[in-house]
Amino acid sequence: MLSFTGFLTEATKSGYSDEHALANVWNHAVNHPDAKKLLSSHENLKAEIEKAKTDPTHRLNFANQTAGFTGGVKKPEHEAAYYRELHHAAHAIHGFAQHPAFKEAIKNKDEAKVSGGESGEVSPTWKKHGARNGTSKADVQIGKIGLSLKKGDAQLMSAESNELRATYDHATTQHMKSNPNFTAEHKQQVMDKIHQIGKHMEAMKGADRATQKQHQAHAQKLADEIHNDHPGLMDHVAHEAATGQGKFGGEGKTGTADVLVTTHEGAAPHIHDVKTNNSPIHVKPRLRIGLPKGRDKKTGLGTRGGNAKLDYVTQ
């Protein structure tokens, strides 16, 4: 899920946010008198969008939009980006219409709304580790379905030290439940290394680039050791990073995501339904320790700590 900062960055790239485009096209399509025909192909949806361009009374006409624009201010130069994002969303909406997870939502004409900066109440595990950022994992809510929406190649997680510790605390507990060979002793060993990784990430703040890279290398070695020793653990880490069920206290809680949607330019979306698809969420096989971006312009020293990333792959 994009953070609020990530949301603004994505909007800046195009001039109009993909979340709002998705919500707009969905809401128009499911409420259309001939919704079945409209949803039957992305060509029909795109034709409807083209129709909206010349009809000032049309729900999707640029003149009738107020939200989702770069910086929160609608400008005439955003018009091309607006329609481009609607066309991009058309492929995703057609994909939803073919997927069983959205059958009831289409039947009920459930409204889509952008989650934006919404947040949920974090669980005791997260509070214990001082990880209190409750930003929702869902970018768009369609009825009861929380969507984590991503464009192309995406990160499933980019966690600072506290969030990383909480995520692995939850994931190791879940791994113990599903794998009797993963014991409480194994959990402790993993958590010891996660705490060390967190310390290396925190030490990047205030350090020069060479020192940051040393901490990165040490942390990466520890992360690789964890998943080389316990390869099944990654499934639980990925599931939590995607859904937030541990973070927000269970399935269906405010802040959780039920479906991961990855969109690609001019192509059908990749849809992973967490509730009904028992296959693991696919990520690249290792946790990736990232260097912080923030650096003081005068001293060149880091102003932020490092982060741990999981890269999502659609396969």
Image (cartoon, rainbow, N blue to C red):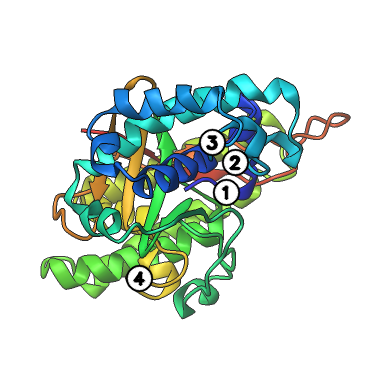
- The quadrant where residue 76 appears: top right
Numbered disc in front, either 3 or 4: 3
Crowd tier of the residue under label 3, counting other residues whose Cα lies within 10 Å: few below 14, some 14–19, many 20 or above: some
Residues at circles 2 and 1 in contact by the CB criterion of under 8 Å:
yes
Q: Name the residue under label 4.
A: 252
Q: Name the residue under label 1.
A: 3
Q: Could you tell me if residue 284 is visible in this image?
A: no
Element at badge 3? loop
Residue 58: which numbered mark, if any? 3
Left or right, 131 with respect to 254, comes to right
Residue 287 picture location, percent across and down: 38, 43
Q: Which of marks 1 and 4 is nearer the N terminus?
A: 1
Residues at circles 1 and 3 in contact by the CB criterion of under 8 Å:
no
Numbered disc in front, either 2 or 4: 4
Per the model, the C-alpha gap separating discs 2 and 4 is 24 Å
Numbered disc in front, either 3 or 2: 3
Residues at circles 1 and 4 in contact by the CB criterion of under 8 Å:
no
Residue 145 picture location, percent across and down: 35, 59
Amino acid type for the residue under numbered disc 2: Gly
Residue sitting at 38 percent across and 23 percent down? 47
Residue sitting at 62 percent across and 36 percent down? 212
Residue sitting at 35 percent across and 30 percent down? 45
